[in-house]
Amino acid sequence: MVYDAFPIWIRFAHFINIIFITLLIRSGLEILSALPKLYWHDHCIPGTEWIKFTRKKMPKDKLWISLDEEESFSPLIALPGHKNLGLGRHWHFFSIVFWIANGAIYYILLFTSDEWQRLVPTAWSIIPQALHDTMLYASFHFPSVGHPYNAIQQLTYFVVVFLLGPFMIATGSAMSPAIDARFPWYPRIFRGRQTARSLHFLGMVAFVLFIIIHLTMVTAERFSDNMGNIVFGRVTSFGIAAGLFALFVIAVLIVNIWATRVSLRTPRQVQNSLDKVLVLAKWILFRKAVSKQQLPRSKVSLFFRVNGYPPESKEYKQLLESNFAGWRLKVYGLVEKSLELSLSDLYALKKQEQVTEHYCIQGWTAIAGWAGVPMQYILLLCKPREEARYVVFRSYQYTNMDEFYEVLDLEVVKHPQTILAYEMNGEPLDIGHGAPLRLRVETQLGYKMVKWLKSIEFVNDYKNIGKGQGGHREDHMYYSPRAEI
Ligand SMILES: Nc1nc2c(c(=O)[nH]1)N[C@H]1C(S)=C(S)[C@@H](COP(=O)(O)O)O[C@H]1N2
Ligand SMILES: [Mo]
């Protein structure tokens, strides 16, 4: 094939890709800042990380929680920076939708035209040629102009477009609690969820290195030709090339600065706008995903982080002193029959056990055995009415002066592994992990699993509860009301 100019769609897809890859890298760093430690195993035992980006030391003599481990990264590298995991994740997932759509269109056009031939090597001789070219570069010489790329260039583009891109999607998906709960074999391909997280990080490093080298080469080697081809599809003069390069840089800066500013200034609007896309996408993809986890007891973690400090109230302390004798779980709202259940009432119902992996939104995981009453039984007892669409779980714990609560979609509450747990690893729940009762929802991130449970209310809408976002973490930390990724 004779290599003509790049068609307009390639040049356009390249530009769109630049925008979203920068948003993805910066929001990815924000997500990393929430647990700036990487592990090769799913127990995430403190001190066993293979790399960390924090100097903080957790106290040995008193309770610390996972939120204490968060670092504040600068908005210069992270989107939006300053400890905003909620919005970092919104940007990451929002950008993924467009990055993947752009990539998919690019792939389709590539293979329905001849353009794939630029990228896909067709002979093994590319390997020795690529080595040869690399040696030339290493001695500060340029290989002769390729057709259209030289061997190392073609090989690098091939690896980035066809291997690194899909690798990031594959390792990224392996971090979703819903995907992994529904298909427990999937994260095992990467030897577990934390290995997927570490590999996803290394893939990001590879992308950054590629971008640096790519920019260096494009500017160092036939700069005017390259810039002209990338933008117009034909060679141009040095002056215009320099102008085009500057325009690229400015476009990337404008988008990134704008995204950072609106996030820091009007976080609620950004949360709600991006969630318009994301909540719908998650509802379509995950509403029916049911957890199929049943890990062997031998997999249970020796250490399980606590998140959220236990309740300080007198009310809770009194209940604790009486060993929860006076504790009652209130079930009310849009139900045929309101309930007030004591712990012995709950013990009398059929006990279900499950050994599952917990995924905290911050990034750590841990495995434990839980036992308690499936919500399905509670539903049989209280009989939710037709209008009930959501279920509000309230806690005895307060933070930021507000009661901790979380809202779940009724469909998710009906899943067989959604349980009210009173035991962890064969022992009654301890205070840190939510005594006397906590929720387990095995397709969701940890923040949905309310500890120190007080009541359960069935509602039609949650707009008038708390700040109306669907939970305490949604209200205060801009998390999303659906927690499947
Ligand atoms: N009441 C209450 N429940 C809560 C929290 C909290 O802060 N308060 N933290 C949530 C988060 S973010 C996680 S990851 C899990 C942690 O459960 P664990 O402390 O048993 O590990 O509890 C969830 N339930
Ligand atoms: Mo969490």
Image: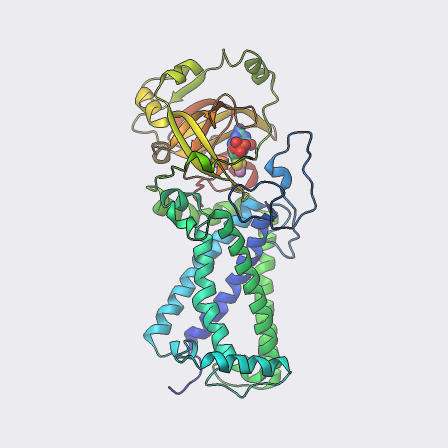
Asked whether residue 293 is in view, the answer is yes
Left or right: residue 188 compared with residue 220? left
Tell how many labels. Answer: 0
Residue 387 coordinates in the image, percent (x, y): 32, 29
Residue 44 coordinates in the image, percent (x, y): 55, 42
Is the residue 190 above or below the residue 344 in the image?
below
Residue nearest the viewer, comparing 452 with 404: 452
Residue 479 coordinates in the image, percent (x, y): 51, 42
Residue nearest the viewer, comparing 276 with 88: 88
Residue 40 coordinates in the image, percent (x, y): 54, 49
Left or right: residue 98 compared with residue 228? left
Residue nearest the viewer, comparing 360 with 272: 360
Q: In which quarter of the image is residue 375?
A: top left
Question: The N terminus appears in which quarter of the rendering?
Answer: bottom left
Q: Residue at x 59, y 37 (%)?
A: 66
Q: Residue at x 40, y 69 (%)?
A: 106
Residue extending furthest toward the front: 298
Is the residue 220 above or below the residue 295 in the image?
below
Q: Quadrant of residue 240?
A: bottom right
How is colour applied across the structure in the image? rainbow
Q: Which residue is drawn at 44% across and 59% down?
A: 98
Residue nearest the viewer, comparing 61 with 165: 61
Asked whether residue 23 is in view, the answer is no
Left or right: residue 93 compared with residue 139? left
Left or right: residue 218 compared with residue 290? right
